[in-house]
Image: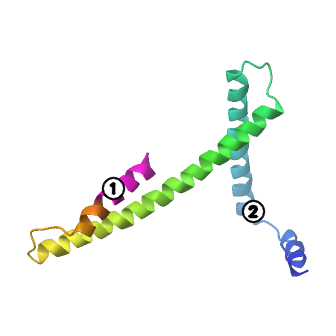
């Protein structure tokens, strides 16, 4: 029952004018991307008008692109962490006078660089 009270309470909340403007802007951007993708599907398939199947396929594609973006951002962050660890370890070893790189650093550095590359492409 507390869930329904929470939903009822949340539904009574008003948007701050600036938040409402941002909300509307995001909805319009999403709707524009969805409409454009649906129209592209209709064009590619040679249909005369946008059909509900085009809209459903467009929604899947737009959501898939958003999921890929999230994965790429996560990959870039993890890559930066790993590459930063590699750089820190390398500097520590060089300042200690060691001429060799540890196996962990030799593995972590390139993996971090690849994750960064995946995240920015």
**Mark 2–mark 1 distance (CA, rounded to whole Å):** 43 Å
Relative to 42, 82 lies left or right: left
Frontmost residue, 55 versus 22: 55
**Residue 5 position within the rendered picture, expressed as x and y whole percent measured from the top left:** 89, 78
The number of discs equals 2
Q: Quadrant of residue 98?
A: bottom left
User: Which SS class for mark 2?
Assistant: helix
- The location of residue 107, given as percent across then percent down, is 29, 62
**Residue 17 has which mark?**
2
Residue in the foreground of this view, choosing between 99 and 48: 99
| Residue located at (44% from left, 52% from top) | 119
Provide the residue designation for mark 1.
113
Secondary structure under tag 1 reads helix
* Up-down relation of residue 31 to residue 21 (above or below): above
Where is the C terminus found, in terms of image quarters? Answer: top left
Tell me whether circle 2 and circle 1 mark residues in contact (CB < 8 Å).
Answer: no
Q: Is residue 81 left or right of residue 90?
A: right
Residue at the extreme bottom: 2
Q: Nearer the viewer, mark 2 or mark 1?
A: 1
Against 81, residue 43 (above or below) is above
The residue lying at 16 percent from left, 74 percent from top is 93
Write down the region rendered in magenta. 110-121
Q: Residues within 10 Å of mark 2 (few under 14, many from 20)?
A: few
Magenta-span inclusion, residue 105:
no
Give how far across and how far down residue 104 sits, in percent: 27, 69
Q: Residue at x 31, y 64 (%)?
A: 108
Is 21 situated left or right of 101 in this image?
right
Magenta stretch: helix, strand or loop mostly: helix
Relative height, residue 22 to residue 90 (above, below): above
């Amino acid at each position: 029952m507390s869930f329904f009270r929470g939903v009822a309470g949340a539904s009574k909340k008003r948007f701050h004018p600036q938040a409402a403007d941002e909300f509307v802007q995001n909805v319009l951007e999403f709707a524009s991307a969805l409409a454009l993708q649906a129209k592209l599907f209709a064009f590619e398939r040679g249909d005369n008008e946008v059909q509900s199947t085009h809209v459903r396929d467009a929604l899947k594609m737009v959501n898939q692109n958003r999921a890929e973006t999230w994965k790429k951002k996560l990959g870039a962050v993890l890559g930066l962490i790993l590459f930063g660890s590699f750089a820190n370890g390398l500097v520590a070893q060089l300042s200690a006078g060691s001429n060799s790189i540890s196996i962990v650093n030799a593995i972590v550095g390139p993996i971090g660089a690849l994750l960064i590359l995946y995240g920015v492409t």
